[in-house]
Image: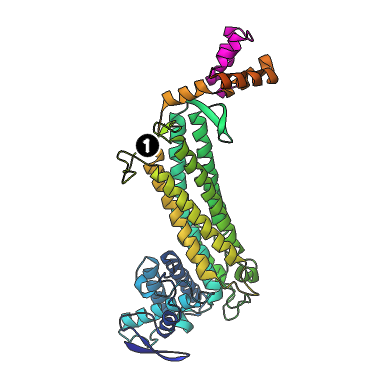
Amino acid sequence: MRTEHDTMGDMPVPQSALYGASTARAVLNFPISGHPMPAALLRSLAQVKSACARANEELGRLAPEESRLIRQIADEIAAGGLLEHFPVDVFQTGSGTSTNTNLNEVIANRASQLAGQPLGSHRPLHPNDDVNLGQSSNDIMPTALHVSVALALQERMRPALAHLHSELEGRSRAFAAVVKIGRTHLMDATPITLGQEFSGYAAQVAKAVGRVDRAAAALHELAIGGTAVGTGLNTAPGFAGIVCRILREQTGIPFVEAPNHYEAQASRDDAVEVAGLLSAIAVSLTKIANDIRLLGSGPRCGLGEIRLPSVQPGSSIMPGKVNPVMCEMLVQVCLYVQGLAQVVVMCGGSGQFELNATIPLIAHALHEAVPCLANGALVFADSCVHGIEADEARCAELVGRSLMLVAALTPYIGYDRASSVAKEALGTHRTVREIVLAGGLMDVATLDMALDPVRMTRP
């Protein structure tokens, strides 16, 4: 151990740790979950710190050598280095001050290490005066939250959903000519093609991609520049604009300074909006996964209209059983994401006055939800949707047995008589065609044309 000093006095710190006294206090204060802050958030926080150092240099507030050193170390962290030096638990101070301090201390101590100075000496960089110059946890943590989640949506969620959409579109084209029975209320309805059914799933995912874009857009405004309460105390005019410009250049995402810093720091409504959109995507994918699971049920005693890829044995007691495990995986992912989204909603309503003090938990929930949902969609696309096959014989069999073909006869024999035909066919275990011909209700040619299931899918 070594001894470092902060405003509360001396504190023992592990000799190998690059963090300092305040982080060591936080580790002792918050032995809660064992979950450190999300790596994606830490990397974006470092990216923001690098941009802040460059902005302070441009404004003449930070010497070029100090700026270069901060940016060098911050960029190392942003690239995924030194993350083992961030031990603070998710359940910590609600502003994320412990994590901001953790990063400041790591950058300062890494600078000391590179300069051959003792750790904790604050030479050549001071964690507060230099690394945190013009910043507060209250503006930089919401900024890092927005940057990190926007990047996760752009780099992970959008490509995953676009891939799932492509696979569903491919199945829709492949199944374009397969006529099957439609279902409403879980009951037989009029015919539809399997391709039409899958086109609906593809359209749902296309809308999900649009929701990802709207979620990312909700995060474009950044709180940086507001410092403690939104007034910008101890920062320089133009600082926030420069930071946003640098982040735009680095990420390609159109980040801008929030027009009202009091809203940007006091509320987390933008994060709540993102959570709502993620929840909508999860609901959509749940519906698709459940439909595909039901369509593939069987193989002999279920619907069995499609065959799902066999990826693993399904039972420890029933030999040969194969289960729709990819559908089940995705449903569980989606339920988890909806729970995480609800956590964000409750966090969003838990702010008081000039700060929402649940930022670490919001970060944890969103950075858990995005990769889980993205990975779930990717695996489902590749291990399930890609290999789905149509059982055309089974689809044709169920269409032929359906009573709801009678709906096409209404223009010829009327609703009431068509209803009687359906009831008689059900009660006598005969087909609609047999009942109509036996009653002399229509001639054969007209009846065959009306009951053509392919024609019913393209009225």
Residue 112 seen in the current view: yes
Segment colored magenta: 431-459
Residue at the extreme bottom of the image, as rendered: 9
Classify the position of the C terminus by image quarter: top right
Residue 254 seen in the current view: no
Q: Is residue 201 magenta?
A: no
* 118 relative to 358 in the view: left or right: left
Classify the position of the N terminus by image quarter: bottom left
Which residue has dot 1 on it? 387
Q: Position of residue 330 (x, y in %)?
A: 44, 48
Q: The residue tagged with tag 1: helix, strand or loop?
A: helix
As displayed, is residue 240 above or below residue 313? below
Most foreground residue, 298 or 110: 298
Most foreground residue, 450 or 403: 403
Question: Secondary structure of the magenta portion, mostly?
Answer: helix
For label 1, the crowd category at 10 Å Cα-Cα, with few meaning under 14, some 14 to 19 and many 20 or more, is some
Q: Which residue is drawn at the image coordinates 53% and 78% (left, top)?
A: 134
Q: Position of residue 274 (x, y in %)?
A: 56, 57
Q: What is the three-letter code of the residue carrying label 1?
A: Gly
User: Is the image coloured rainbow, by chain, by secondary structure, or in one colour?
Assistant: rainbow
Query: How many marks do you count on the picture?
Result: 1
Q: Which residue is drawn at the image coordinates 60% and 12% (left, top)?
A: 436
As displayed, is residue 291 above or below residue 109? above
Image quadrant in which you'd find residue 458: top right
Most foreground residue, 23 or 429: 429
Q: Is residue 451 magenta?
A: yes
Most foreground residue, 98 or 402: 402
Residue at the extreme front of the image, as rendered: 427
Q: Which residue is drawn at the image coordinates 48% and 42% (left, top)?
A: 290
Q: Position of residue 314 (x, y in %)?
A: 34, 44
Q: Which residue is drawn at the image coordinates 41% and 43% (left, top)?
A: 381
Q: Position of residue 219 (x, y in %)?
A: 56, 60
